[in-house]
Image (tube, rainbow, N blue to C red):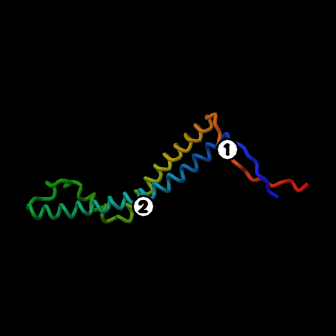
Amino acid sequence: MIHQVSGRVLAVSVRAAMIAGGWIGFALGVVTGCVLGAGLAWFAGAILSWQRDLSLTLGVTEQLLPFGSQVPVLERIQANWFIVVPFVGVLVGVFAALVGALIGGLVAASYNRSPFGVQVVVEVPRDPQ
Protein backbone atom coordinates (compact mmCIF):
# COMPACT_ATOMS: atom_id res chain seq x y z
CA MET A 1 0.00 0.00 0.00
CA ILE A 2 1.27 3.46 -0.87
CA HIS A 3 0.42 6.73 0.86
CA GLN A 4 1.34 10.33 0.05
CA VAL A 5 3.61 12.49 2.18
CA SER A 6 3.85 16.26 1.75
CA GLY A 7 7.13 18.10 2.27
CA ARG A 8 9.56 20.71 1.00
CA VAL A 9 12.79 20.43 -0.97
CA LEU A 10 15.30 22.58 0.89
CA ALA A 11 18.50 21.79 -0.99
CA VAL A 12 19.57 20.62 -4.43
CA SER A 13 22.85 18.83 -5.15
CA VAL A 14 25.22 21.31 -6.76
CA ARG A 15 27.25 18.46 -8.27
CA ALA A 16 24.18 16.87 -9.86
CA ALA A 17 23.01 20.24 -11.19
CA MET A 18 26.43 20.88 -12.72
CA ILE A 19 26.50 17.44 -14.35
CA ALA A 20 22.98 17.89 -15.75
CA GLY A 21 23.81 21.39 -17.00
CA GLY A 22 26.98 20.10 -18.63
CA TRP A 23 25.20 17.30 -20.48
CA ILE A 24 22.42 19.59 -21.67
CA GLY A 25 24.93 22.23 -22.74
CA PHE A 26 27.02 19.65 -24.59
CA ALA A 27 24.03 18.24 -26.47
CA LEU A 28 22.76 21.65 -27.52
CA GLY A 29 26.29 22.82 -28.31
CA VAL A 30 27.05 19.85 -30.57
CA VAL A 31 23.90 20.44 -32.61
CA THR A 32 24.55 24.18 -32.84
CA GLY A 33 28.24 23.63 -33.61
CA CYS A 34 27.52 21.16 -36.40
CA VAL A 35 25.13 23.65 -38.00
CA LEU A 36 27.79 26.36 -37.66
CA GLY A 37 30.45 24.05 -39.10
CA ALA A 38 28.24 23.22 -42.08
CA GLY A 39 27.60 26.91 -42.59
CA LEU A 40 31.33 27.63 -42.40
CA ALA A 41 32.12 24.96 -45.00
CA TRP A 42 29.36 26.21 -47.30
CA PHE A 43 30.44 29.84 -46.81
CA ALA A 44 34.06 28.94 -47.69
CA GLY A 45 32.85 27.36 -50.95
CA ALA A 46 30.66 30.36 -51.73
CA ILE A 47 33.57 32.76 -51.19
CA LEU A 48 35.83 30.68 -53.44
CA SER A 49 33.20 30.59 -56.19
CA TRP A 50 32.62 34.32 -55.86
CA GLN A 51 36.35 35.00 -56.08
CA ARG A 52 36.73 32.83 -59.19
CA ASP A 53 33.87 34.65 -60.89
CA LEU A 54 35.19 38.04 -59.80
CA SER A 55 38.74 37.33 -60.96
CA LEU A 56 37.49 36.19 -64.38
CA THR A 57 35.15 39.17 -64.72
CA LEU A 58 37.63 41.83 -63.63
CA GLY A 59 40.77 40.15 -64.96
CA VAL A 60 42.52 40.61 -61.60
CA THR A 61 44.63 37.99 -59.83
CA GLU A 62 43.02 36.33 -56.82
CA GLN A 63 45.66 37.77 -54.46
CA LEU A 64 44.37 41.31 -55.10
CA LEU A 65 40.74 40.41 -54.35
CA PRO A 66 39.14 40.33 -50.89
CA PHE A 67 40.07 37.11 -49.04
CA GLY A 68 42.83 36.65 -51.61
CA SER A 69 45.46 35.55 -49.12
CA GLN A 70 43.01 33.15 -47.44
CA VAL A 71 42.31 31.09 -50.57
CA PRO A 72 44.36 28.05 -49.43
CA VAL A 73 42.64 28.02 -46.05
CA LEU A 74 39.20 28.33 -47.64
CA GLU A 75 40.00 25.53 -50.10
CA ARG A 76 41.12 23.29 -47.25
CA ILE A 77 37.93 24.03 -45.27
CA GLN A 78 35.75 23.31 -48.29
CA ALA A 79 37.60 20.11 -49.21
CA ASN A 80 37.63 18.74 -45.64
CA TRP A 81 34.07 19.62 -44.69
CA PHE A 82 33.53 16.13 -43.26
CA ILE A 83 36.23 16.90 -40.67
CA VAL A 84 35.33 20.57 -40.14
CA VAL A 85 31.65 19.96 -39.29
CA PRO A 86 32.13 17.46 -36.41
CA PHE A 87 35.24 19.29 -35.14
CA VAL A 88 33.36 22.58 -34.85
CA GLY A 89 30.42 20.67 -33.32
CA VAL A 90 32.55 19.10 -30.60
CA LEU A 91 34.43 22.36 -29.97
CA VAL A 92 31.22 24.35 -29.51
CA GLY A 93 29.75 21.42 -27.53
CA VAL A 94 32.62 21.44 -25.02
CA PHE A 95 32.33 25.20 -24.58
CA ALA A 96 28.55 24.96 -24.13
CA ALA A 97 29.03 22.11 -21.63
CA LEU A 98 31.29 24.31 -19.52
CA VAL A 99 28.80 27.16 -19.66
CA GLY A 100 25.90 24.79 -18.86
CA ALA A 101 27.76 23.30 -15.89
CA LEU A 102 28.53 26.77 -14.59
CA ILE A 103 24.91 27.87 -14.93
CA GLY A 104 23.64 24.64 -13.32
CA GLY A 105 26.00 25.10 -10.38
CA LEU A 106 25.06 28.73 -9.93
CA VAL A 107 21.33 27.97 -10.05
CA ALA A 108 21.69 25.14 -7.53
CA ALA A 109 23.86 27.23 -5.21
CA SER A 110 21.46 30.18 -5.34
CA TYR A 111 18.50 27.85 -4.74
CA ASN A 112 20.26 26.34 -1.72
CA ARG A 113 20.80 29.82 -0.27
CA SER A 114 17.13 30.71 -0.75
CA PRO A 115 14.94 30.60 2.38
CA PHE A 116 12.04 29.21 0.34
CA GLY A 117 11.66 25.59 -0.64
CA VAL A 118 9.55 23.86 -3.24
CA GLN A 119 6.43 22.10 -2.03
CA VAL A 120 6.43 18.42 -3.14
CA VAL A 121 4.23 15.39 -2.62
CA VAL A 122 6.04 12.03 -2.47
CA GLU A 123 4.47 8.58 -2.53
CA VAL A 124 5.95 6.27 0.09
CA PRO A 125 5.16 2.60 0.67
CA ARG A 126 3.52 1.82 4.03
CA ASP A 127 5.07 -0.63 6.41
CA PRO A 128 3.38 -4.05 6.09
CA GLN A 129 3.10 -4.34 9.89
Other-residue count near label 2 (Cα within 10 Å), few / some / many at <14 / 14–19 / ≥20: some
Q: Residue at x 52, y 43 (%)?
A: 103
For badge 2, the amino acid type reads Pro
Name the one closer to the observer, 63 or 118. 118
Assign the N terminus to one quadrant of the image: bottom right
Image check: 125 left or right of 91? right
Above or below for 94 versus 75: above
For the residue labelled by badge 1, is the local secondary structure a helix, a strand or a loop? strand
Number of marks? 2
Q: CA distance from mark 2 to mark 1?
A: 43 Å
- Percent across and percent down for residue 23 are 54, 53
Tell me which corner region of the image, top left, top right, bottom left or bottom right, holds residue 2.
bottom right
Q: Residue furthest right?
A: 129
State which tag comes first along the sequence, 2 or 1: 2
Assign the C terminus to one quadrant of the image: bottom right
- Percent across and percent down for residue 92 are 43, 53
Image check: 124 left or right of 29? right
Other-residue count near label 1 (Cα within 10 Å), few / some / many at <14 / 14–19 / ≥20: few
Tell me which corner region of the image, top left, top right, bottom left or bottom right, holds residue 32.
bottom left
Q: Residue at x 13, y 54 (%)?
A: 64
- Percent across and percent down for residue 67 are 21, 54
> Residue 83 has which mark?
none
- Percent across and percent down for residue 30 are 45, 57
Give the residue at mark 2. 86
Q: Residue furthest left?
A: 59
Q: Nearer the viewer, mark 2 or mark 1?
A: 1
Above or below for 22 versus 44: above
Give the residue at mark 1. 119
For badge 1, the amino acid type reads Gln
